[in-house]
Image (tube, rainbow, N blue to C red):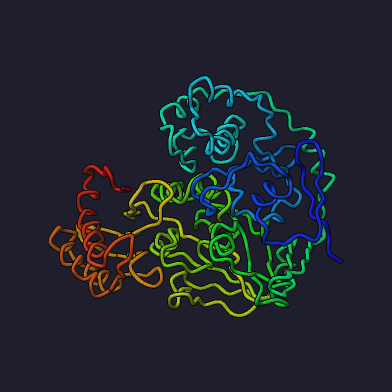
C-alpha cells in the first residue's frame, strides 16, 4: 500500500498522500500551503528566489542546506525538516539588517537572499568559512545592486537557534521501509509512482524490477525536465541518502554515486586543488547542495564538469546490476551523445580516482561566459608527467568539445616522449583539430573552442615554470 509523505515544518509534522510525485516543493508551498513568500523566478535553479532550508537528521543534530524549491520534488522532503521565509516570522536579525542597510527594493528576490544568509548564520552546508559572495552566488537581484546585500552578509548577524525539538520530531518519523507514493494523472492517463528505497540492496532489486524507471538524486537536471519541458515521468526511484560514502586511501579516492558536490569538494581538493576549484564553479551553493557526483556522470552530458577532470586522472566507474558489479574506465562509459555503457537494470554505484604522484602536473580549467552558475564552453583537464624535461605521460580530456566528455588521443601522442617546450606544445595544440570538431552554439563557436583549448595547452609551459595563473578559471 502507498505510504504517506511526512516532513517537519514549523512545529508540526506534515503528512501528505495522493500527491503528484513530480510536484515541486515550490508549487506545493505557493498553491497548496499558501506560503507565497517563496518566489518563482527562473524555475530552473539559477536565480535563488525560491531558496529554502532543508534539514536532515545526522545523529543528534540537524544538517541544514539551502536548496532551490523550484526543482526539488516534494517527496524528496520525506523524513526531513523544512524552513521557509515564513518560518522566521519577520524576527530574524538578517531580515532587520536587510531593512536597515537598504538591501531590498522590489523585494522579489529578498526572501531567497534572506534564507541563504540565515543558512549561513546557522552554519549550513557550503557556508562555513566561505566568502559571502560565494554563499550568495545563487541569488540574483535585478534592482538593488549587491553592495548593500553584501554588507548584510559581512555583518553575519546570528540568532539563537535550538533544533533539539526538530531532532526529536525527525526521530519520530524516521522509518526503514520503502516510501511508495502513487498518483493517478488524469491529464496523461498514467499512474505516476515514486519509490524511495532505504538501502542499496533494495535499490538494486528495484532497479532490476523496473529498469525503465528514472533514477533521481538531486533533481538538478531532471527537475528541469518537468518545469521547463513539461515531461511526464511515470516511475521515479529516488536515491537520496544512498551511496554517500567517501573513502580516502593511499591508493586513491572512492566517492559514492550519491555524494553531493558540496560533500565531495573537500576530498577532491585534497586530491588536487584544481578539483576543489572546479566543484566551486558548478552551479551555486543551492545546486552543489543537491547535485551529486554520480548524477553528473550518469546522465552523460557532454558539458558535465566533473567527467573531463576525472577522465584525465584515470578514474574508474563501478556499475551495479543486481548483486553483480563491474568496473570500467570512466572514459569508456560515454559511448556517443545521449548513450552510455549502461545495461538495463544497471546503475552507477561509485567512482574511484587514483592518487596522484608527487611528480604529476595537473591543471583543470573551466571556461564560461560568467564565473558563477554558468555552463562550460570548454572544460579542459591536463595530466602530465615530466622527467628530465621530457613528457613521459600525458592524459588530456575535454568537455564541450564533442558529443561526450572525451580524451584527446592524437594530442597526447604528440606530447608523449617529446621535450616539454613551447614549440612542442604549439604542435600539440594544432593536433587538437584531429581529436575534435566542436559544435557552434550560444556558448561559443567551433573555432573559438579549438583556439582557446590550444591556448590553454600552450599556457601549461608557463604554469609549469611557476608563472602567474591569474584568470586560469576565467
x then y, percent, for residue 394: 30, 65
Question: Residue at the spot x=46%, y=64% of the render?
Answer: 315
Query: Does 103 appear above or below 287?
Result: above
Residue 383 seen: no
Question: Residue at the spot x=59%, y=54% of the render?
Answer: 71
x then y, percent, for residue 137: 46, 41
Residue extending farthest to the top is 100
Residue 46 seen: yes
Quarter holding the N terminus is bottom right
Residue extending farthest to the bottom is 344
Locate residue 33: give its quadrant: top right
Question: Residue at the spot x=34%, y=53% of the render?
Answer: 368
Q: Is residue 317 left or right of residue 3?
A: left
Give the camera-side residue of 78 and 32. Answer: 32
Residue extending farthest to the left is 423
Question: Residue at the spot x=74%, y=70% of the render?
Answer: 186
Query: Does 168 appear above or below 46?
Result: above
Query: Does 316 appear above or below 368?
Result: below
Give the camera-side residue of 18 and 367. Answer: 18
x then y, percent, for residue 75: 72, 56
x then y, percent, for residue 145: 41, 32
Give the camera-side residue of 26 and 410. Answer: 26
Q: How many marks?
A: 0
Give the camera-side residue of 354 and 157. Answer: 157
Q: Is residue 80 left or right of residue 168?
A: left
Amino acid at each position: 500500500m502507498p505510504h504517506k509523505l511526512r516532513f517537519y515544518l514549523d512545529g508540526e509534522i506534515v503528512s501528505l498522500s495522493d500527491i503528484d510525485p513530480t510536484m515541486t516543493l515550490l508549487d506545493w508551498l505557493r498553491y497548496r500551503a499558501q506560503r507565497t513568500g517563496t518566489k518563482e523566478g527562473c524555475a530552473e535553479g539559477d536565480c535563488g528566489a525560491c531558496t529554502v532550508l532543508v534539514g536532515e537528521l545526522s545523529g543528534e543534530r540537524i544538517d541544514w542546506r539551502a536548496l532551490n524549491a523550484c526543482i526539488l520534488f516534494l517527496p524528496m522532503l520525506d523524513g526531513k525538516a523544512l524552513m521557509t521565509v515564513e518560518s522566521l516570522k519577520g524576527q530574524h536579525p538578517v531580515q532587520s539588517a536587510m531593512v536597515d542597510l537598504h538591501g531590498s527594493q522590489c523585494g522579489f528576490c529578498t526572501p531567497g537572499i534572506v534564507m541563504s544568509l540565515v543558512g549561513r548564520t546557522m552554519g549550513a552546508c557550503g557556508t562555513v568559512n566561505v566568502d559571502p559572495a560565494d554563499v550568495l552566488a545563487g541569488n540574483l537581484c535585478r534592482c538593488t545592486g549587491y553592495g548593500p546585500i553584501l554588507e548584510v552578509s559581512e555583518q553575519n548577524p546570528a540568532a539563537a537557534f535550538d533544533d533539539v525539538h526538530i531532532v526529536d520530531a525527525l526521530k519520530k518519523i524516521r522509518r526503514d521501509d520503502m516510501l511508495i507514493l502513487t498518483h493517478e494523472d488524469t491529464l496523461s492517463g498514467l499512474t505516476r509512482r515514486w519509490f524511495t528505497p532505504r538501502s542499496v540492496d533494495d535499490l538494486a532489486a528495484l532497479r532490476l524490477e523496473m529498469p525503465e524507471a528514472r533514477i533521481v538524486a538531486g533533481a538538478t537536471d531532471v527537475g528541469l525536465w518537468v518545469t521547463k519541458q513539461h515531461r511526464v515521468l511515470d516511475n521515479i526511484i529516488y536515491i537520496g541518502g544512498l551511496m554517500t560514502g567517501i573513502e580516502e586511501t593511499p591508493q586513491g579516492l572512492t566517492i559514492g554515486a550519491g555524494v553531493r558536490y558540496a560533500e565531495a569538494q573537500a576530498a577532491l581538493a585534497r586530491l588536487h586543488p584544481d578539483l576543489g576549484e572546479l566543484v566551486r564553479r558548478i552551479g551555486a551553493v543551492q545546486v552543489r547542495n543537491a547535485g551529486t557526483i554520480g548524477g553528473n556522470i550518469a546522465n552523460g552530458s557532454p558539458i558535465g564538469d566533473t567527467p573531463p577532470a576525472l577522465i584525465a586522472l584515470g578514474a574508474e566507474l563501478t556499475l551495479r546490476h543486481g548483486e553483480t558489479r563491474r568496473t570500467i574506465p570512466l572514459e569508456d562509459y560515454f559511448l556517443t551523445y545521449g548513450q552510455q555503457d549502461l545495461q538495463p537494470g544497471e546503475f552507477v554505484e561509485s567512482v574511484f580516482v587514483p592518487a596522484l604522484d608527487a611528480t604529476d602536473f595537473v591543471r583543470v580549467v573551466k571556461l564560461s561566459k560568467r564565473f558563477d552558475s554558468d555552463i562550460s564552453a570548454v572544460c579542459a583537464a591536463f595530466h602530465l608527467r615530466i622527467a628530465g624535461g621530457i613528457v613521459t605521460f600525458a592524459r588530456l580530456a575535454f568537455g564541450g568539445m564533442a558529443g561526450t566528455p572525451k580524451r584527446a588521443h592524437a594530442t597526447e601522442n604528440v606530447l608523449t616522449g617529446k621535450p616539454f617546450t613551447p614549440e612542442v606544445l604549439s604542435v600539440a595544440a594544432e593536433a587538437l583539430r584531429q581529436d575534435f570538431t566542436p559544435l557552434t552554439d550560444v556558448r561559443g563557436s567551433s573555432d573559438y573552442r579549438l583556439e582557446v583549448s590550444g591556448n590553454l595547452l600552450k599556457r601549461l609551459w608557463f604554469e609549469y615554470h611557476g608563472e602567474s595563473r591569474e584568470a586560469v578559471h576565467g
